[in-house]
Amino acid sequence: MKPLLIAVAGASGSGKTTVANALLQGIQSQGLTATLFSQDNFYNPIGHPLSNYDEPQALELDLLAKKLNELKQGLATEIPTYDFVVHRRQQETLIIEPLDVILVEGLFLLSQPNLVSAFDIKIYLDVPQEICFQRRFERDQIERGREPDDIRRQYNDQVRPGFERHIAPYRDQADIRIDALPSDVKSFIKNRLNLPR
């Protein structure tokens, strides 16, 4: 059986990783095999001429599309890993097996036609930008060692403009739009995702 591919898209700080992990656990609790990886794994090294993380050109999205198509064909695939602390791609790679369900979370999954067409179900997290900024502000200090002034500057110069150009205009590509993780994840999976079994 070929895997079901699910995209979890939304702005930076919208909760993509949290929602995707909750869905992963809920799907696995239904007796299905599932895995999760991030579009972030496909960022170019920081030495790339474009180091604005909020532009699609900062990632190898054609490589991501190729990997998704391999999974859709029932093939295992090898994907890169990226470290935001040192701002570079790592030597280590991940092997993704074609399990029952493959979840992918990322900023630009709905804005690129070759990615949109690869997914069977597309979820968009519709969260106000003020909340997204606060979450990002806290995350980048704790997880990425960033300074508060740098976070604010990057948000105003890159993150917010990137959201308005490359994320918000494509939210209608989603099959499902949610503003928060449903409290009953199992019910959401059963009633909204219509997974097998």
Image (spheres, rainbow, N blue to C red):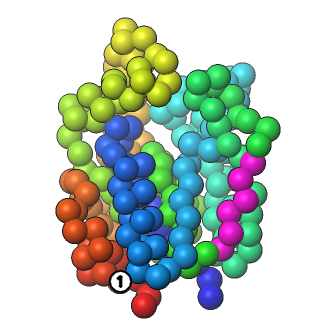
Q: Quadrant of residue 46?
A: top right
Residue at image point 65% right, 37% down: 82
In the image, taking residue 41 as reference, residue 178 lies left or right, namely left
Residue 175 position in % (x across, y down): 33, 69
Residue 40: percent from the left, percent from the top? 56, 42
- Residue 170, can we see it? no
Magenta stretch encompasses residue 49? no
User: Pointer 1: residues within 10 angstroms few (<14), some, or many (20+)?
Assistant: few
Q: Which part of the image, by quadrant, shows the N terminus?
A: bottom right
Note whether 170 is above or below 3 in the view shown.
above
**Horizontal side of residue 87 vs 31, given as left or right:** right
Left or right of residue 45: residue 156: left
Residue located at (41% from left, 75% from top): 29
Magenta: main secondary structure equals strand
Q: Residue furthest bottom?
A: 197
Q: In this rendered view, identify the residue nearer to me: 175 or 16.
A: 16
* Residue at x 64%, y 22% (from the top left corner): 86
Magenta segment boundaries in residue numbering: 93-98
Q: Is residue 18 visible?
A: yes
Q: Three-letter amino acid code at disc 1?
A: Asn
Q: Quadrant of residue 183?
A: bottom left
| Residue 1 placement, left or right of 178 | right
Above/below status of 75 relative to 77: below
Locate the C terminus and report the quarter of the image it occupies. Answer: bottom left
Nearest the eye: 32 or 64: 32
| The residue positioned farthest toward the right in the image shown | 91
User: Residue 103, how many percent across, how many down?
Assistant: 50, 63
- Residue that appears at 38% across and 38% down: 12
Q: On screen, 34 above or below 141?
A: below
The residue carrying mark 1 is 194
